[in-house]
Image: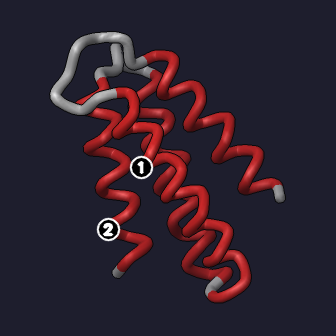
Amino acid sequence: MKANVFLSTFLGAVLISSVSYAACTPEEAQAKALEISEKMQALATSNPEKMQTVSQKLSSAASNLSSQEGSLDKTCEAYDEILAEINS
């Protein structure tokens, strides 16, 4: 549950901070965020250790994105990296 709250907060903050025009649309970013959330929930039961590892990378990505002027391209790129980690 704690991971879900963190994830929701992170995803919301990234989407709000990503206001510049980008090849990645807000809808695409939102879809990727939802996919990450769903897969993290599945990992919580199937592979808690991997979920912790991915959560740490997600936290690091959140720090990096929030300390820069975010763009949707950077956000989608970070989401793609997280999804690749989850799917590996």
Label 1 sits on what residue type?
Answer: Lys
> What is the distance, in whole Å, between disc 1 and disc 2 at their CAs?
11 Å
Give the side of residue 18 with respect to residue 47, left or right.
left
Q: Name the residue at 39% across, 19% down.
A: 18
The residue under label 1 is 32
Q: Which corner quadrant holds the C terminus? A: bottom left
Element carrying mark 1: helix
**Which of the two marks, 1 or 2, is nearer to us in this view?**
1
Residue at the bottom extreme of this rendering: 46
Total marks in image: 2
- The percent position of residue 17, horizontal first and vertical second, equals 46, 16
Farthest residue toward the right?
1
Q: Position of residue 61 (x, y in %)?
A: 43, 43
Look at mark 2 in the image and give the residue it sits on.
84
Is the residue 85 above or below the residue 60 in the image? below
Query: Which x, y percent locates residue 77?
Result: 26, 44
Q: Quadrant of residue 22?
A: top left
Residue visible at 60% across and 63% down?
38
Asked whether, in this view, residue 4 is left or right of residue 47, the answer is right
Q: Position of residue 32 (x, y in %)?
A: 42, 49
Up-down relation of residue 53 to residue 24 (above or below):
below
Tags 1 and 2 touching, CB below 8 Å: no
Query: Which one is earlier in the sequence, the residue at label 1 or at label 2?
Result: 1
Q: Mark 1 packing: few (<14 Cα in 10 Å), some, or many (20+)?
A: many
Mark 2 falls on what kind of element? Answer: helix
Quarter where residue 83 is shown: bottom left
Image quadrant occupied by the N terminus: bottom right
